[in-house]
Image: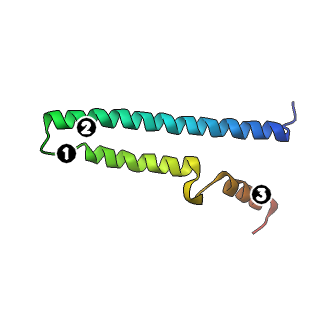
Amino acid sequence: MKKVTKNDEAYLRAKKRVAELKGFYAHLIVFVIVNMILVIINLVLTPRFLWFLIPLLGWGVGLFFHAVFGFGLFGVFTKEWEERKIKQYMGGES
């Protein structure tokens, strides 16, 4: 079995990060396309009631949290935080 070196670990972390970013951007693209379609349907069929705002806001909250956890915005659950916690629990530090 091949021993994992620091470079291998860095590569695997980078690969995981790229996959996370790819997932977020796919989510963002689908969000924009679907909500554009919903806006058009709403304005054509029932322009007096702007129901498209309900899924837009609900899904927007989900997209926001995807960004927060995916990019570590606001310092919440960043990779550095994760590494510190892993070292803390492995080493028994408080």
The amino acid type found where label 1 is placed reads Leu
Give residue 87's mark.
Answer: 3
Q: Give the distance between the C-alpha atoms of the residues marked 2 and 1, in whole angstroms.
A: 8 Å
Q: Classify the position of the C terminus by image quarter.
A: bottom right
Q: Give the distance between the C-alpha atoms of the residues marked 1 and 3, in whole angstroms.
A: 50 Å
x%, y% of residue 2?
A: 87, 31
Q: Classify the position of the N terminus by image quarter.
A: top right
Q: In this view, does 18 lie to the left or right of 25?
A: right
The amino acid type found where label 2 is placed reads Val
Secondary structure under the numbered disc 1 in the rendered image: loop
Give residue 90's mark.
Answer: none
| Vertical relation: 8 (above or below) 60 | above
User: Closer to us: mark 1 or mark 3?
Assistant: 1
Q: Is residue 43 left or right of residue 79?
A: left
The residue that disc 1 covers is: 50
The residue that disc 2 covers is: 39
Query: Which of the two discs, 3 and 2, labels the residue nearer the N terminus?
Result: 2
Residue drawn at (81%, 61%), measured in percent from left and top? 91
Q: Do the residues labelled 2 and 1 touch (CB within 8 Å)?
A: no
Secondary structure under the numbered disc 3 in the rendered image: helix
The amino acid type found where label 3 is placed reads Lys
Query: Which of the two discs, 2 and 1, labels the residue nearer the N terminus?
Result: 2
Q: Residues within 10 Å of mark 3 (few under 14, many from 20)?
A: few
